[in-house]
Amino acid sequence: MKRHLSLAFTLCCTLCLLAASAKAQAGQRVAPSISVTQLRDGVYFAEPNAGGNAGFIVGDNGVIVFDATTSPALGKLLLAEIAKVTPKPVTTVILSHSDGDHTSGLASFPTGLTIIAHENCKADLVATANTRNPFPQDHLPNKTLTKSETVTIDGVKLQILHFAAAHTSGDLQLYLPQQKIVFTGDVIATNCCGNVRGPQVYTLIHPQKNGSGEGWVRTVKGLLALNADTYLPGHGEVQTKADVQQRFDRVETRFNAVKKLVAQGKTLEQVKQALPDTGLDPSLDPVQFPDFTTVVYNELTRKQKS
Ligand SMILES: [Zn+2]
């Protein structure tokens, strides 16, 4: 388990860096860069040129950051972008999950901040301590939760959400009720690593981090029920509620189709014949980045046996 976790953590970071380095090898120096968009008063979306997206909210006395980017260099850039917007200090960081492309940038953040994460996310990060690519242990989450919480931080009303295990078992989403904005983390990702490179048809689940297809359906149903009109994905562009609804409908339909075939006792091969997938990226390791149909098949057959 520990080896799996550290492998997944390392691989996420590596893949993002690989993409950049492939360009570098092709002679294109790819300096880390980050583009920041103001969405509503005090709410900003940050899209780095590698790894996971992030964001920040300017509060009364401080700044709340959602996710910390894929590398110390990008983490530094994110802090510099925040400083361009406000002299207020970063006080709080909320982590959507433990994948390195959303957490490694924390190494550049000051110590002593409030770092909020799901309990399982923290466990994943602790487990990387003796690996080749450890998460900075002096930046471990110091406030953990296992279910949704409504809080006010620096004068900003927030709902920190956890509906179920989805992309990983330690997923958090952030809902700003007054601004009708949701930071989704990798529960919604329209491009990037794994089998989501190119047109993402369904979603990426990490079974090695106890992610779940069933939990994804429950989570996104919950996110769609929120009074929100703007969804900020872990990878890719700003999503409307209609965009998220379309993805939800596709994923739920595929989930139910697999469920029906599993109930009929079909093998994975038979399920894949009946439900062919297009656009899967053959260059990526299917163990680390399994396609959605395989994840659901394994999840439901495991459940049948238990
Ligand atoms: Zn992820």
Image: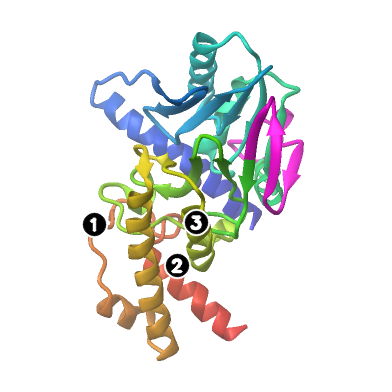
Relative height, residue 231 to residue 168 (above, below): above
Cβ at disc 2 under 8 Å from ligand 1: no
- Confirm whether residue 218 shows in the render: yes
Identified at 60% across, 20% down, the residue is 108
Alpha-carbon span between mark 3 and mark 1 = 30 Å
Q: Position of residue 90 (x, y in %)?
A: 64, 19
Residue 131: numbered disc: none
Residue depicted at x 40% and y 71%? 255
- Going by the numbered disc 1, the residue's amino acid type is Gly
Left or right placement of residue 228 versus residue 243 in this view: right
Mark 3 touches mark 2? (CB < 8 Å): no
Residue 135 in sight? no
- The mark found on residue 279 in the picture is 1
Left or right, residue 29 beside residue 116: left
Q: Split into 4 quadrants, where in the image is the N terminus?
A: bottom right
Looking at numbered disc 3 in the image, what kind of residue is underneath it?
Ala
Q: Where does the magenta region start and end?
A: 129-158
Residue carrying label 2: 295
Q: Position of residue 238 (x, y in %)?
A: 37, 37
Q: Is residue 28 magenta?
A: no
Which numbered disc, 3 or 1, marks the residue closer to the eye?
A: 3
Residue shown at the point (50%, 80%) measured from the top left: 301
- Mark closer to the observer (3, 2): 3
- Residue at the spot of label 3: 225
Marks 3 and 2, Cα distance to the nearest angstrom?
25 Å
